[in-house]
Amino acid sequence: MPLSLTRRSFLASTTAAATSSLWLPHHLHKKKRILVLGGTGFLGPAIVNAGLAKGHEFTLFNRGKTNPGMFPNVEQLRGQRRRPRPDRPKDPAQDLSALAGKKWDAVVDTSAYYTGEVEDMCKVLAGNVGQFVYISSLSVYKTLEVDAVPVDEQSPLAECADKYTQEMGANFENYGALKRYCEDAAAAAFPGKATLVRPGYIVGPGDPTDRFTYWPARFLRGGECLAPGAPDNDLQFIDVRDLGEWIVHLIEEGVAGPLNAVGFDGSISVSEFLHTGKGTLNHGCTFTWADDAFLESNGVSAWGDMGCWTPKAKNGHCSNAKALAVGAKFRPIAETIRDTAAWVKDGRGDRKWGAGLTAEREQELLAKWKAKK
């Protein structure tokens, strides 16, 4: 499923009873049986690995197309959760039969983009699953990356004309609204037991989008770096491993309701991020800051051509206060940068980059910026 390179293109306060922000040792938690829809892409393995480390039992339901050899000792169920599209007669038929009559303590849905498909899944699982964890997106917020108004879980949500459309739109303009309607479907089917996790940019080793990975790779290369926008501009993301561990924690504690899944314990600026990368990986980096207007006028796309940058006028800080109150934890940014850089060198391979400036394009923009001054 192709996603665009921004949140728009690529969920009621928490209802849990008393939940501690201190995580209990795994031996004090009851063993959970957890179904993951998907599970072998990017976020899925982080959830499964975190849960296995804490003694939980997993079942994966997917087509067996992505990394089919992953988790050989975990139960695997095969099927097709997508509905065929009317304009694609060769699409395979939906097949959820492998799930019928089986029971789990919780399900984590990492792969739903369309309202009807969530409703279909809920019909099969209703009565057989205690908690529905739906991985949504910050894109559900109507103003996200439109203006700089701060957002929290009560902020206005995106809408589209037809909540059952199977068209994302030419520029993925329906993505946020459809994720919102998927949330609604899960919450309606599992009242009081739907956990609606709204991540922002998920980053770290294994990220297939390259949106964040651009910077660890750039730090490794060293030299003069084109630095984006205002140095004090806000920056938020979440390490995939932190998100996976927290999702398992939410299942252990039975936390429900919408929760923004984004770092950190305090506010982080783009300048702090870049200098952390420099200090962690390569002291030979220098930074030349070009303002938002210059970058936008030269067609540089946020989180596409330039990772870890949203123009300040469109960059509303997202509150993670509720997530922190129910146990969200974040590793040091330096660790995420270092581990992602190690993956760039030893695990990413030589596939074409999906985001980030080429060295030639960066040099062209640097020269243009200097000539302008």
Image (cartoon, helix red, strand yellow):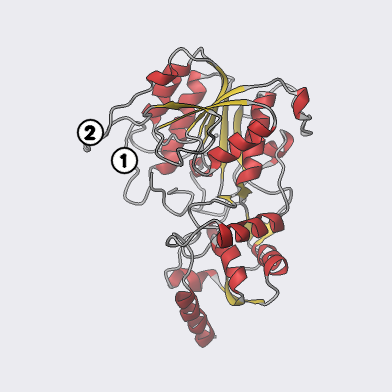
Q: Residue at x 53, y 51 (%)?
A: 207
Q: Secondary structure at mark 1?
A: loop
| Label whose residue precedes the other's in the sequence (1 or 2) | 2
Q: Nearer the viewer, residue 70 or 360?
A: 70
Mark in front: 1 vs 2 = 2
Count of labels shown? 2
Q: Residue at x 45, y 31 (%)?
A: 182
Image height check: is 130 above or below 243?
above
Q: Nearer the viewer, residue 142 or 42?
A: 42
Quarter containing the C terminus: bottom right
Judged left or right of residue 124, residue 103 is right
In this rendering, does residue 14 appear at all?
Answer: no
Disc 2 crowd rating (10 Å Cα; few below 14, some 14-19, many 20+) is few
In this rendering, does residue 276 appear at all?
Answer: yes
Which mark, by number, is residue 167?
1
Which mark, by number, is residue 253?
none
Q: Secondary structure at mark 2?
A: loop
Q: Nearer the viewer, residue 344 or 258?
A: 344
Query: Residue 263's x, y, as percent?
Result: 66, 48
Q: Tell me the kind of residue under disc 2.
A: Pro
Structural distance between the alpha carbons of marks 1 and 2: 11 Å
Disc 1 crowd rating (10 Å Cα; few below 14, some 14-19, many 20+) is some
Quarter containing the N terminus: top left
Query: Residue 30, located in which quarter of the rendered image?
Result: top right
Query: Residue 210's x, y, as percent?
Result: 50, 57
Q: Tell me the kind of residue under disc 1.
A: Glu
Image height check: is 317 above or below 107?
below
Q: Residue under label 2, please give it.
A: 86
